Image (cartoon, rainbow, N blue to C red):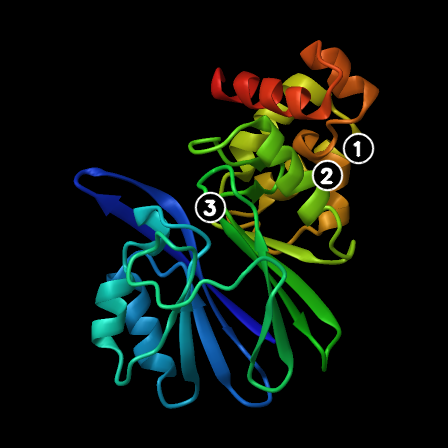
Amino acid sequence: MHIQSIPMSVVHEGVGSSNNYAYLVHDDETKDAVIIDPANPPEVIPVLNDKQSSLNLTAIMNTHHHWDHAGGNTKILAALPKPVPVIAGKDSEGVTKTPSHGSKFNIGKNIQVTALHTPCHTQDSICWFFEDQSSDERVVFTGDTLFHGGCGKFFEGNGEEMEKALNQVLAALPDDTKVFPGHEYTKSNVKFLKKVAGDNKAVQALEKFADENQETQGKFTIKQEKEHNVFMQTKSEEMKKVTGETEPSKVMAKLRELKNAG
């Protein structure tokens, strides 16, 4: 499995960010590929054109419907030499297929994908768990649900839903699963972690890496997120003390409230 990150600046009606990621993923053996969250066509189409002779693009995939993730689908489709399905939640632009939670499909010969529904940031949020059966490699594309050291805002959900998404669904993945989020938010997340968790060794390691590297996507695993990400520590006595709550979903909600407040 080969993953090419495509950093993007996504602007819509004067509003946007310069820290989005699209991902081009292909099976090393068959060269079948998918593009995930190709929100900014001017930055994605040249990459696809460059790979047109060497890869077989089989689908566009989205982690959720927000324009800075799915807003480029129509233009990407128009630029392709042949139509491909859009595999995403029900509200994504041009969606043609929405796999049910836990359902699986293949990319090429070696990559198996599992759809993990994680409603909260949006109700159609889906994390995509990829397993390469030839290399024994595991990755998860988390969109705006899980970031390195953080999580997405609860635009369409609540603490109970994010608690389930992070600490039941994603926490159940193999520890060595590498995390590929939808944005580069690690440095800002570290600032919050230091406020609420102090300078423990895991947070220090995350901060050091973020300070030394502009891009952090795919450099940390589910196991490491459990160690440095307070949103995956809602059952800990430390986070209960920080938030003044005891129920994990309420700890989650309070942590998000504290993060929103800066």
Q: Position of residue 45 (x, y in %)?
A: 28, 70
Marks 2,1: beta carbons within 8 A = yes
**Residue found at the far front of this picture:** 100
Residue type beneath disc 3: His
Callout 2 environment at 10 Å: few (<14), some (14 to 19), or many (20+)?
A: few
| Residue with the mark numbered 1 | 201
Q: Earlier in the sequence, mark 3 or mark 1?
A: 3
Q: Is residue 91 above or below residue 113?
A: above
Front: mark 3 or 1: 3
Between marks 2 and 1, how big is the CA–CA gap?
A: 6 Å
Q: Which of the 4 image quadrants contains residue 228? A: top right
Q: Position of residue 127 (x, y in %)?
A: 55, 54
Which residue appears at 61% of the width and 56% of the height? 218
| Residue with the mark numbered 3 | 183
Residue type beneath disc 2: Ala
Between marks 2 and 3, how big is the CA–CA gap?
A: 20 Å
Query: The N terminus is located in which quarter?
Result: bottom right
Which residue appears at 26% of the width and 85% of the height? 81
Q: Is residue 26 above or below residue 126?
A: below
Q: Position of residue 31 (x, y in %)?
A: 51, 86
Q: Earlier in the sequence, mark 2 or mark 3?
A: 3
Q: Is residue 155 above or below residue 72?
A: above
| Residue with the mark numbered 2 | 205
